Amino acid sequence: SPDNHGGLRLTAATLAAASKYPATAYKNPYKKNGVYQDDLEDFAAIYQALGIPPRGDSGQAWQRHPLSYLMEAADDICYLIVDIEDAYQIRQIEHRTAWELLADLAGDMADSDRLAAMESKSDQLAYLRAKAIGRLVHETVAVFQESEAALLAGARDAPLLKTIPSIDKLAALRAYAEKYIYISRPVVEVQIAGHRVLTGLMQTYCQAIANTHGRDHHARADQMILALLP
């Protein structure tokens, strides 16, 4: 908001470009919602200032900023590729498997002689990771340039990665990660632990609020719990 003199003071264009899902949960046309009701007025002002039209008839959703497609692609590329390298580092997958997955994406961008001269397996994978990301970035930029008119008109919904030449290789990489990395035992154990912690905290806070609501006398335990709330 122009009246808010604190924070990073980001421009409307920057905020919109960083919003992959510019909609609330109400009649949401996207797969997720990225706008809370508390921020609805600010988002409306941002998209109005940029001349980006609403999407649908809810009054709570807008077309995506063209640059948000690039941000989405960069996010997907980096996380997916780095997840393969990380999986090797924590011994979820073998070096040969990680090599083959990354080399398939890197293609002819990787220098085989330079790669063979590297003694460290970690260095080899880091090199292949960089080349794989480089290839996907080049392809994504080309699709973005080809789709510029459609993006500016709000006529494209598909992510940029859906139409790059390496889409099949990227899909195979994603399928492997979902089957062998994201649901591996160490990963699932951490997720379960996190779920238990969050669930326990919510139950504790809600019970403390219920115990103290409308009462003059508060139990010591409830007071200590509520003191942690911002």
Image (tube, helix red, strand yellow):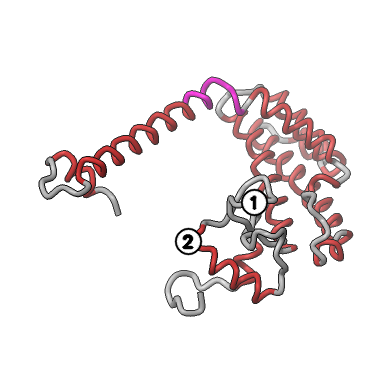
Q: Which residue is mark 1?
A: 27
Crowding near the residue tagged with mark 1, few <14, some 14–19, many ≥20 C-alpha atoms within 10 Å: some
Could you tell me residue 81's position as x and y percent? 69, 39
> Is the stretch drawn in magenta largely helix, strand or loop?
helix
Is 186 in front, or is 47?
Answer: 47
**The C terminus appears in which quarter of the rendering?**
bottom left
Q: Which residue is mark 2?
A: 38
Crowding near the residue tagged with mark 2, few <14, some 14–19, many ≥20 C-alpha atoms within 10 Å: few
Q: Is residue 68 left or right of residue 106?
A: left
Query: Over which residues does the magenta segment extend?
Result: 182-189
Give the label, 2 or 1, closer to the camera. 1
Could you tell me residue 150's position as x and y percent? 85, 62
Is 123 in front, or is 22?
Answer: 22
Give the residue at x 79% y 62%: 154
Give the residue at x 72% y 24%: 97
Give the image quarter of residue 121: top right
Up/down of 120 relative to 30, above or below: above
Mark sitting earlier along the chain (2/1)? 1
Give the image quarter of residue 22: bottom right
| Secondary structure found at label 2 | helix
| Secondary structure found at label 1 | loop
Give the residue at x 69% y 45%: 76
